Amino acid sequence: MPETNRIEYKRELSDGLEKEVIAFLNYREGGILYIGIDKNENVYGLADSDGDQLKIKDRLKNNIRPSALGLFDIVSEERTGKDILKIIIASGPEKPYHLKKYGMSEKGCFIRMGSSAEPMSQKMIDELFAKRTRNSISKIKAGR
């Protein structure tokens, strides 16, 4: 299955992990990220999939805002006798999700476009945030 708007392959655990996860969180359908498989679908596997699983959980927990906890699952799988990881990411309800260190900026917000994670424009970021705050403000009950 080649890369699509819902599927991304990474040969190894790399710096771009959070960016890819954020793009799926901000995308209307979420997506699946495979670690241990390259773009041509060659299976390389991971030397320490258990350790990588913990690193991924910590990185996603600490580097993405608002919290993505509960919006992703990390599953160990075996392909051609090698361990890989499958990260299943839901479309998040509190868009825009962003890299904690860059905030809600074009450097911190990404969205899935075809088979890649693209930076969001400031206009798109502002529109998504306005929807989020409008929805949460409308749910506040007035005191008597």
Image (tube, rainbow, N blue to C red):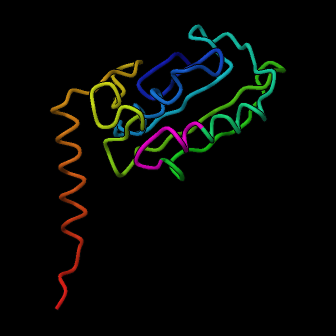
Q: Is residue 106 magenta?
A: no
Which residue is at the far bottom?
144
Residue at the (42%, 38%) spot, across then down = 100
What is the total number of numbered labels drawn onto the structure image? 0
Which residue is at the far right?
81
Q: Position of residue 113 (x, y in %)?
A: 33, 22
Q: Position of residue 112 (x, y in %)?
A: 36, 27
**Magenta segment:** 59-67
Residue at the (48%, 33%) spot, across then down = 21
Left or right: 103 with respect to 38? left
Q: Position of residue 62 (x, y in %)?
A: 54, 42
Q: For this rendering, which residue is in front, 53 or 144? A: 144
Which residue is at the far front?
101
Q: Quadrant of the N terminus?
A: top right
Residue at the (37%, 41%) spot, across then down = 97
Q: For this rendering, which residue is in front, 76 or 79? A: 76
The quadrant in which residue 105 appears is top left
The quadrant in which residue 88 appears is top right
Q: Quadrant of the C terminus?
A: bottom left
Q: Position of residue 120 (x, y in %)?
A: 27, 27
Residue 19 position (above or below residue 103): above
Residue at the (20%, 65%) spot, across then down = 137
